[in-house]
Structure formats: C-alpha cells, structure tokens
Amino acid sequence: MTVIARNPQDSENSALLVAPGYEGVTEAWFQPEFWDNRAKPVTTGGRGGAWFIDATPRKLVLRHYRRGGFVARLVEKSYWFSGYESARSLAEFRLLTELKSRGLPVPEPVAALAWKYRLFWYHAAILVERIPGAVTLPDSSDLSEKSLWIQLGGMIRRFHDHGLNHVDLNCDNILVSGDEMYLIDFDRCELLPERDNRPNSAWKQRNIERLHRSVKKRCQKLSPDLQECLWQHMLQAYAHKSDSTEC
C-alpha cells in the first residue's frame, strides 16, 4: 500500500507520494542542494535535471521533469496545473508501482512530488532506487553480442504483453546491469486496456520504430551491417520466432 502524504505546512500547494519503507522522505529530498556533495548530475541521456544520490543505505536517482522541444524555451520546468491527480510525477510513480507489482524489470519507486508554481502551474520530481552497476544500452560491454539483443527483444515483448505503451522508448531508457536488463523513465507512459492491446497494435509499432531510430543514432560504434543484423535478432526475439541469422 502506498503512503500518501501532503506538506503539513502548506497542504494546498504540494502533493507527495511515498513508498513503504521510505516514510521519512520530505520535500527537501527533491532538491539536489539538500544532498550537498552526495548529489552528482547524470550526464547520459535525457534533458538534464537528474542526479545520482548517494543516500544511506540505498542509492537513489532524483529526476526533475523538464519539457522538450520548442516549448522548453518558454517554460522549461513548468506544467499547467489541472489537479494533483494528473500531475506527471505522481502518475509515473503510480505506474511504476503497478509495473513493479507485476514483476516487470523497472526501478523501485521511492517517492514523487508535485508542487504548485505561481497560480496555474506546477513543478514535478520523482525519486527511484538506483540500479546497481547499470549502464545504458549503448554503453554495455556486450553491445555487439547477439544474446544482448535477444534479451532486449524479449524484455520489450514482456512490457507490450502487459499493455505498456512506452512513448519514449530509446537506448538511454534501457539499462543493463550484469545479466539483467531494465526499462526506465515512464513519464507520459500508460497501461492500455486489453481491447487496445492486440498483436499488431499501431502503438507497439511506434514504440519499435522509435527505438530503431535511437539505435541508429546512439549505437554508432557498431558497423551499419552489424547494427542491422543485431536489430533483426531483436525483432525475432520480440516476435517469439526461431532465429537462425548469423552476424
């Protein structure tokens, strides 16, 4: 059961969700300054605004929500406030909690915060547990190995079978830690109902196509021929088809 708490000093201006075992989390945890030199900026992927937190006893990742594209030039970190139920950080926290309960490979959610900014806007942040030893897919030492791409195809298929539409499926949102693989960053993602979860659903193809574009951009240490061959291994594993392709 998720603990729900609000700022006791100003309950109208913020909302905080906290996972069991982290009842001591306060709003201060969501500011890197609170952690002093224990907060290190994440330099790989994303739009910035993320930090590795050297907390005790567990390591955490703090992420502030930031806009992309042209609109980011106008309102980099602010979102239109239409109620805390629709706040992006709280929605992602709830989705992570559900995915974790289904046994899917995602980070452990810790806490999420949304706080009002001026009259009609809000800011948002989320804390998750850091996956030990994890690197992004392009930084994996096994990037050129067929087995890694077969594992990737199987993982994506698991999420799709559960109806998870990951709207930003890219190489930097796939982490590899030893023999394990994880999917991260579920902002704006959603679990779709069974009626929208057919094998040939268009949203699944959009996820795959987005990842393919990211692979072409971020995995350039692989030759074009090897990259394409490994991608075919991924597709075969995703489709649960036998694979006799050799790279």
Image: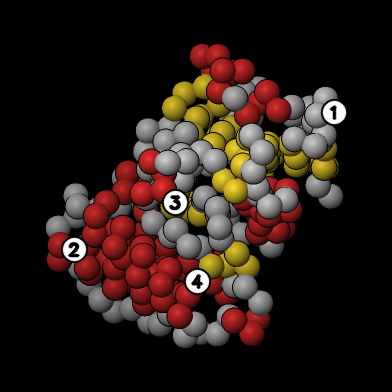
The amino acid sitting under disc 4 is Arg
Pointer 4 or 2: first along the chain: 4
How is colour applied across the structure in the image?
Answer: secondary structure
Q: On the image, numbered disc 2 is attached to which residue?
A: 226
- CA gap between label 1 and label 3 equals 35 Å
Q: Work out whether residue 49 or residue 179 is closer to the camera in this orientation and state it.
A: 49
Q: Which residue does the image show at 22% across and 62% down from the upper left?
A: 227
Q: Position of residue 186 (x, y in %)?
A: 55, 54
Q: Which residue does the image show at 27% across and 51% down from the upper left?
A: 218
Residue 8 circle label: 1
Q: Which residue does the image show at 55% across and 23% down from the upper left?
A: 32
Q: On the image, numbered disc 3 is attached to which residue?
A: 173
Q: Is residue 81 above or below residue 226?
A: above
Q: On the image, numbered disc 4 is attached to which residue?
A: 157
Which is more foreground, mark 1 or mark 3?
1
Which is more foreground, mark 1 or mark 4?
1
Q: Is residue 183 left or right of residue 22?
A: left
